[in-house]
Image: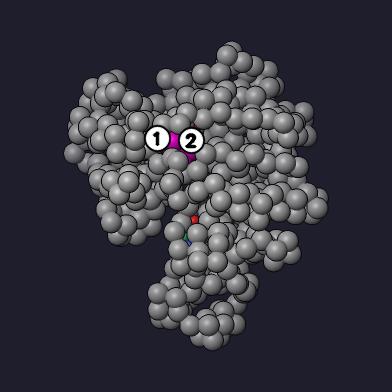
Amino acid sequence: MHILLLGSGGREHALAWKIAASPLVTKLWCAPGNAGIAREAECVALDVANHAAVIDFCKQNDVELVVVGPETPLAAGIVDDLAKVGIKAFGPGKEAAQLEGSKGFTKDLCAEFDIPTGAYRRFNNAADALRYVRAQGAPIVVKADGLAAGKGVVVAKTLTEAEAAIATMFDGAFGAAGAEVVIEEYLAGREISFFALCDGESAIPLASAQDHKRVFDHDEGPNTGGMGAYSPTPFVTAEVHDQIMSRIILPTVAGMKQRGMPFRGVLYAGVMLTEDGPKLFEYNVRFGDPECQVLMLRMMSDIVPAFLAACDGELKHFDLRWYAEPALTVVMAAKGYPGDYRKGTRIDGLDDAAKVEGVEIFHAGTVAKDGVILANGGRVLNICAMGKTVSEAQARAYEAIDRIKWPDGFCRRDIAWQAVEAEKAN
Ligand code: AMP
């Protein structure tokens, strides 16, 4: 098969690595890709926002399957545009992508189909939103309705913070994404990520994972796109798993079908394990980054037939196999991230780091110049490792990191601390 992967981050490097391992694949391209992806696929300088250019490329190169990594092309309807000309693409169409593209849409779906989530209201003006938060009190969560690159959510501990968030959002800080605001009940509990592969009718769960959103150790500092992840998480017990499937994932797939916008692709549920059971706080319509990296390491099955089954509505009798060993990934980011940071700084020692047993390095934001790897983004590298235990995987990842010479980079030193503590307690 000829396959085209869209995207350029660590998630896409992991997907490229897994797709390239499939015996079904004769040729893999990635647009636009990065220096690490170039080891697995031929990188092409296509503008992914230009759907006509993507379609032309697919036609010229007999591409039979397009795999879409990030949410922006999904929300822009690339899967629909490819389908119109008969090209199969893995991911939801534009209407189904609203599960990520509009928080209000998802909350309304939850209300209609009785999916457990926090109480909420939607607002299109600041005055009404302010009146509502003052009546509700803090803590409370203020969310821009649309896509805001993970920055449109403010978990306000005080009323003042909530009021400020409402003012910023309606002042246009997130452009059109903040023209509408959702105010949501604060959910206390442990946060986990749950992934399911969906074909419009049925869904099969992927392995559980947990990411680390805050930039510094001990979950301090501002939120980021994700500083590390591990899989499986000990907190998704068999019971929790079944509750999430039966009360959240399957009703969502059924609801979307009923609405005439069947969901095909990866459904990524942000779930809070509360005292009253699991509650959904958000959906994403693609693999998480960096959770995808640990899922790909743990997936034993060939991923290409799974993508095809999801596209073709044939997941019902499909089965995925996983390695039992845990996997972990540590994100190395440019100093200053998630604020301002420098690009173009030199990274050495990657080959030496990759020699540590059980270690796999995925690139998130790199370019190669004259044989040297340079940082080219905020999140730059994913140092992944597997081990017999989470503690072993963690030790291996940090051993590899200590071999990397990148004075302008940093990482958290405590990725998977919850699972490591749980292992020590047993
Ligand atoms: P999101 O950008 O939707 O992933 O939200 C960012 C973070 O805000 C999440 O990872 C959660 O930690 C937190 N969050 C979102 N919604 C809620 C909620 N209703 N209650 C508590 N925390 C929340």
Residue beneath the point at 61% across and 24% down: 304
Q: Which residue is mark 1?
A: 327
Within 8 Å of ligand 1, the CB of disc 1?
A: no
Residue beneath the point at 36% across and 27% down: 360
Identify residue type, mark 2: Leu
**Percent x, y of residue 338:** 34, 53
Picture quarter with the N terminus: top right
Residue beneath the point at 38% across and 50% down: 212
**Percent x, y of residue 19:** 54, 23
In primary-sequence order, the first of circles 2 and 1 is 2
Most frequent secondary structure within the magenta stretch: helix
Q: Which residue is mark 2?
A: 295
Which range is magenta? 289-296
Nearer-the-camera pick, 373 or 130: 130
Q: Residues within 10 Å of mark 1 (few under 14, many from 20)?
A: many
Can you tell which quarter of the image residue 343 is in?
A: top left
Q: Report if residue 367 is visible in the image.
A: no
**Percent x, y of residue 155:** 44, 68
